[in-house]
Amino acid sequence: MALSLKALVIDKHQPHNMIAYEPALEYTLDGKRMALIVCDTSRDGCQHDIQRVLKFCGQNGFSCYQTAQFTKAGLMDDLEAFKGMLSDDVCCLTIFIMAHGSLGHINVSDGQIELQRISEMFDNRGCPALRGNPKLFVIQACRGVQQCSNNPCFDASELSGVDQERLWPVESDSLFVYAVCPGNLAIRYPDTGSPLFEEMNHVFSQSVSDYSMHDLFTMVNSRLEKRIERVGYKTDRRPWQIPQNLVMPGLGRRREASGPVGGPLHIVDRLTQKWYLR
């Protein structure tokens, strides 16, 4: 049976028949900038990462807080308390997570917490005060083989309160930066900290106002790919979670993108506008 197809032709000489495409706008950052550090401080070298995060926050106008809790109940309580501080005058949010982990989880002293559970607290459904505002999650943790729970997108408009008319995708306006891709082990040096935060410091210490957040982390990724790692690093996965037959790179070897240790960042961009740190 022949199909009956109707050709759709746009007359380029009649621009009024065309739908104009509006280029991506820029987020307006005219309110408070908030940041939270979630760090397992028992990890050697993490103090260097914290200092670099504090430098990032100071240079870019973020008020920074840190939780000292690393049990399931304690950490979730502190996350709820921090979320309660996020009023409508907050224009952007950054959460830094530094911990041992596996795919989809971070380890705490009495078990594991799903990363999805944390991110959902600050998405458009969980935190209406931040709807339409950019959120950055930087995650320094291993992502070894373990099933990650599904992460469905639901409409968040069923919440009572702000902006009932607009249908908000739950996970929009978020940028996730993972130290490694799924299945890889993130590395950290006891004497200098994590390569991710070391290279972030190099990039974000320069003049950043002309580059979007995504572009800046692309620069970080480029620097990471050019690194020659030295011996003496540790991974952000518990020793008993690392396969017995895993071969670690030796002195002076570049991390392979397809290898189990290190590799490129995993950047998940769900931003709807350009995010500049101006």
Image (cartoon, rainbow, N blue to C red):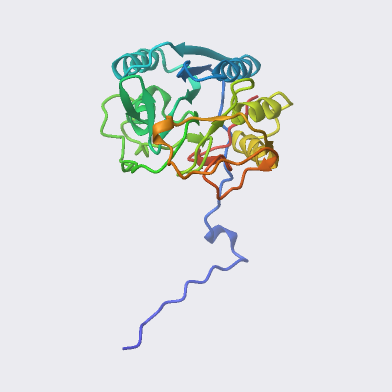
The relative height of residue 38 versus residue 148 in the rendered view (above or below) is: above
Q: Position of residue 3 (x, y in %)?
A: 36, 83
User: In this view of the protein, can residue 123 be seen by the observer?
Assistant: no
Residue at 43% across, 41% down: 244
Of residue 124 and residue 17, the one placed in the foreground of this image is: 124
Q: Which residue does the image show at 49% across and 20% down from the upper left? A: 43
Quarter containing the C terminus: top right
Asked where in the image residue 189 lies, by quadrant, the reply is: top right
219 displayed left or right of 11: right
- Please provide percent x and percent y for residue 156: 31, 35
Residue sticking out furthest to the right: 207
Left/right placement of residue 190 relative to residue 65 reads right
123 displayed left or right of 181: left
Depth check: give the residue in front, 118 or 141.
141
The quarter of the rendered structure image containing the N terminus is bottom left
Out of 258 and 247, give the one closest to the viewer.
247
Q: Residue furthest front?
A: 244
Q: Nearer the viewer, residue 270 or 219?
A: 219
